[in-house]
Image (tube, rainbow, N blue to C red):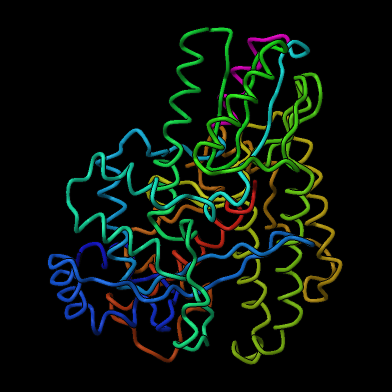
């Protein structure tokens, strides 16, 4: 548990209902880990209410409720997740969403597009509709420990509450069904719940090679089949979904043929062209534009902070903007928008976005309203991501291998006080915290694609 805290949560800036982040938890880590150990073994561990975070799903739609656990609870949930991964290995989907796109392209390349029927749907309020009793029964088939089952049960029954809720009102937030979104166990539990559906659809393919090519990413489902089979596919899906006390989202359920335009996981298929969904492009543009707006509105405060050093302010802005454009590499993972859309064959979308980003400099007097020479490009990033992602164009956190390199990076970002001495431990801690903060912002791009 100490190792899990040090590696996974020590530098995490997210705060739960207790308003304590990973670094603040360090003072009480030893005593709290002992509490976790004792209470989990005795079967008496209880989770604190999760902090409710509302994420907009667009105009006219209710927001998505994300549950934020305390650091202590996150340690327990992480251990439960690792346990579930070992007990249900076939339900662990380690593929990124865009790898499904690569598989779909392979399927369609072997078929005549006009003869392919496409059935697309998603599950209405998926996480919030999971039948907890049925889920627990599925877990009990492989987990003999009553204490572990009860611990998982408590985890999914704990409510998400607003920051300033009154304890006497806690009952108002308790739900009778569903799995909270945002917990480290949420995705694996959802996958376990749908494992039977996935297996049955795969068996249909194995029994008849001309049957269904079925893909599911969380609650987003797409099936490719012959025109004569599409109704059977739809009926089979509805039957299985209904048996799980779930419902298909009729507003997002449709049937088309492969020679018509369709969208999946942020991609847009206009075969043979594969590009980025328009709404996804617009969302990315808005997120880049927000950086320019932030520069304008925080300019004076930051100039004061950096002792009127405008060059430093501009350099920090460009480092941040360029990482937004190229994404980043850390350890063996690749983060960012271009990496997600590596499967497109329509590179014109990147050139168009390059022009739009360059035009945003018209708003910045500090840059003489002209994009600077060191502005990176999405079009070049796409090439580098496909052919040379370790070549240096894309920001690589693995390249900071000693404390002096980390110190220089942090200094350029304005993260160090020039009048304050920093130990090697200080530099490593600040670097790790800044890296995780930056990477989490890049992950946000992936999180809102579907």
**Which image quadrant is residue 222 in?**
top right
At which x and y percent is residue 144? 18, 46
The residue at 32%/61% (across/down) is 77
Q: In the image, is 378 to the left or to the right of 210?
A: right
Q: Quadrant of the N terminus?
A: bottom left
- Residue depicted at x 22% and y 45%: 143
Q: Nearer the viewer, residue 383 or 259?
A: 259
In the rendered structure, the answer to whether residue 169 lies left or right of residue 30 reads: right
As drawn, 103 above or below 218: above
360, 44: nearer the viewer: 44
Q: Position of residue 50 (x, y in %)?
A: 44, 73
87 over 343 or under it: above or below: below
Percent coordinates x, y for residue 263 in the rendering: 72, 35
Q: Residue 277, image x and y in percent?
A: 75, 41
Secondary structure mostly seen in magenta is helix
Q: Nearer the viewer, residue 367 or 214?
A: 214
What residue is at 26 percent from the left and 39 percent from the top?
141
Relative vertical location of residue 123 with respect to residue 75 in this rendering, above or below: above
Q: Is residue 259 on the magenta stretch?
A: no
Is residue 105 within the magenta segment? yes
Residue segment shown in magenta: 99-112
Number of numbered discs: 0
Instruction: From the viewer's perspective, tell me whether residue 418 is left or right of residue 321.
Output: left
């Amino acid at each position: 548990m100490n190792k899990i805290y040090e590696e996974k949560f020590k530098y995490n800036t997210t705060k739960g209902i207790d308003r304590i982040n990973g670094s603040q938890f360090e003072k009480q880590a030893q005593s709290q880990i002992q509490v976790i150990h004792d209470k989990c073994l005795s079967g008496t561990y209880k989770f604190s209410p999760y902090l409710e975070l509302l994420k907009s799903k667009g105009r006219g739609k209710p927001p998505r409720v994300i549950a934020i656990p305390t650091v202590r609870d996150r340690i327990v949930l992480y251990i439960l997740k690792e346990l579930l991964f070992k007990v249900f290995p076939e339900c662990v989907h380690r593929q990124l969403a865009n790898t499904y796109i690569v598989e779909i392209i392979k399927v369609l390349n072997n078929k005549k597009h006009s003869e392919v029927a496409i059935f697309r749907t998603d599950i209405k309020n998926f996480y919030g509709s999971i039948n907890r009793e049925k889920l627990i029964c599925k877990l009990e088939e492989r987990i003999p420990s009553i204490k572990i089952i009860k611990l998982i049960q408590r985890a999914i029954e704990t409510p998400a509450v607003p920051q300033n809720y009154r304890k006497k009102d806690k009952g108002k937030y308790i739900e009778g069904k569903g799995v909270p979104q945002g917990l480290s166990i949420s995705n694996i539990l959802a996958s376990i719940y749908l494992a039977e559906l996935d297996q049955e659809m795969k068996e249909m393919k194995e029994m008849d090679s001309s049957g269904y090519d079925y893909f599911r990413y969380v609650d987003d489902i797409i099936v490719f089949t012959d025109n004569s089979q599409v109704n059977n596919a739809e009926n089979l899906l509805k039957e299985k979904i209904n048996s799980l006390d779930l419902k298909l989202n009729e507003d997002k359920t449709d049937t088309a043929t492969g020679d018509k335009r369709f969208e999946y996981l942020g991609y847009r298929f206009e075969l043979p062209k594969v590009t980025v969904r328009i709404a996804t492009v617009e969302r990315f543009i808005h997120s880049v534009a927000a950086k320019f707006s932030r520069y304008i509105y925080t300019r004076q405060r930051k100039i004061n902070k950096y002792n009127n050093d405008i060059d430093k302010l501009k350099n920090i802005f460009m480092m941040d903007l360029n990482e937004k454009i190229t994404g980043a590499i850390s350890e063996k993972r690749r983060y960012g928008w271009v990496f997600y859309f590596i499967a497109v064959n329509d590179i014109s979308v990147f050139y168009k976005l390059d022009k739009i980003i360059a035009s945003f400099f018209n708003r910045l007097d500090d840059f003489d309203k002209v994009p600077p020479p060191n502005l990176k490009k999405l079009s070049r990033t796409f090439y580098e991501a496909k052919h040379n992602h370790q070549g240096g164009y894309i920001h690589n956190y693995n390249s900071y291998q000693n404390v002096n390199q980390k110190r220089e990076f942090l200094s350029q970002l304005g993260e160090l006080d020039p009048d304050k001495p920093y130990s090697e431990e200080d530099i490593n801690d600040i670097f790790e915290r800044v890296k995780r903060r930056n990477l989490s912002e890049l992950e946000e791009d992936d999180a809102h694609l579907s």
